[in-house]
Amino acid sequence: MGRSFANLHIKSKNLEKTVEALRELSEGYAKVLGRQNNEAPDMKIVMYVSKSNENWISVLHDYFVWGTVKEIGKTLSRLTEEPVMTAGYINEEIFELSFFENGDIQAERIFCEQWTRDEYEELKEERLNDDYLRKALDIRKEDFEAFISITSPEQAVDRLSELVSVSLWSDSEWIPHEETLRKRFEKYEF
C-alpha cells in the first residue's frame, strides 16, 4: 500500500468567516465528520487550519479520507458560500480533485493511469467542467492544458501544488510527524 491523504481548501481571503463555518459544520453537521448525534458532546472536534496563501485556506481533519472528504466539502461549500476544493489521494494510484459551490459539485478531475481506471470499474468523474476548474484554480490556459493531461497522480499533486501555491501533500495524521505541517497549521477545537 502506498501513501494516501485527503484534505480540503476553501477559496477565501476571510479566515474568520471560514473558522465560523467550520464551527457550524462541527456543531450542526457532525454526522458528515463521522460523529453520531448522540456521541459524547463534550468531545471536541479537532481541525487543523492554515491560511495557505492570499486565496486559499487549507483544512485537515482525521475523518478526511478518499470517500468522505467530498461529502464534507459539499456541505462546507453551503456554509461558507465560497468554492471548496477537495483533494483525495489513495495508495499512490488515484488523485481525485473536486470542486463544490453552494452544496453542488461544479467540477471534478481524476488523475490516474488507464490501468487504474480499468481496475476500479466505478471510477469516473461526477462532473467534468474544465472551464470552471480553470477559473476556480486561476490557472493560465496553457498551464491548465498541460496539467489536465497528466496521468500520474503524484505528478498531478506536485504540479497543482505549484500552480496554486498550496501544498496538497498534507493530512491530519502526518502533523505529529512533520514539523513543517505543525508550523503551518493551527489547531482548532470545536
Image: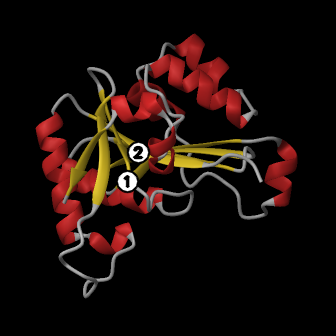
On the picture, is 111 further left or further right than 143? right
Q: Name the image quarter holding the N terminus.
A: bottom right
Q: Residue at x 17, y 35 (%)?
A: 15
Question: Please, is residue 76 above or below residue 130 in the view?
Answer: below
On the picture, is 153 further left or further right than 97? right
Q: Position of residue 6 (x, y in %)?
A: 51, 49
What count of labels does the image hold?
2
Amino acid found under the numbered disc labelled 1:
Gly
Q: Name the image quarter holding the C terminus.
A: bottom left
On the picture, is 17 further left or further right than 171? left
Mark 2 / mark 1, whichever is N-terminal: 2
Q: Residue at x 24, y 55 (%)?
A: 78
**Does dot 2 land on a helix, a strand or a loop?**
strand
Q: What residue is disc 1 on? A: 73
Amino acid found under the numbered disc labelled 2:
Leu
State the residue in front, 98 or 60: 60
State the residue in front, 112 or 175: 175
Q: Residue at x 49, y 39 (%)?
A: 170
- Mark carried by residue 8: 2
State the residue in front, 125 or 151: 151
The answer to whether mark 2 and mark 1 are in CB contact below 8 A is: yes
**Does dot 1 land on a helix, a strand or a loop?**
helix
On the picture, is 3 further left or further right than 162? right
State the residue in front, 64 or 12: 64
- Which residue is outermost to the bottom? 38
Which mark is in front, 2 or 1? Answer: 2
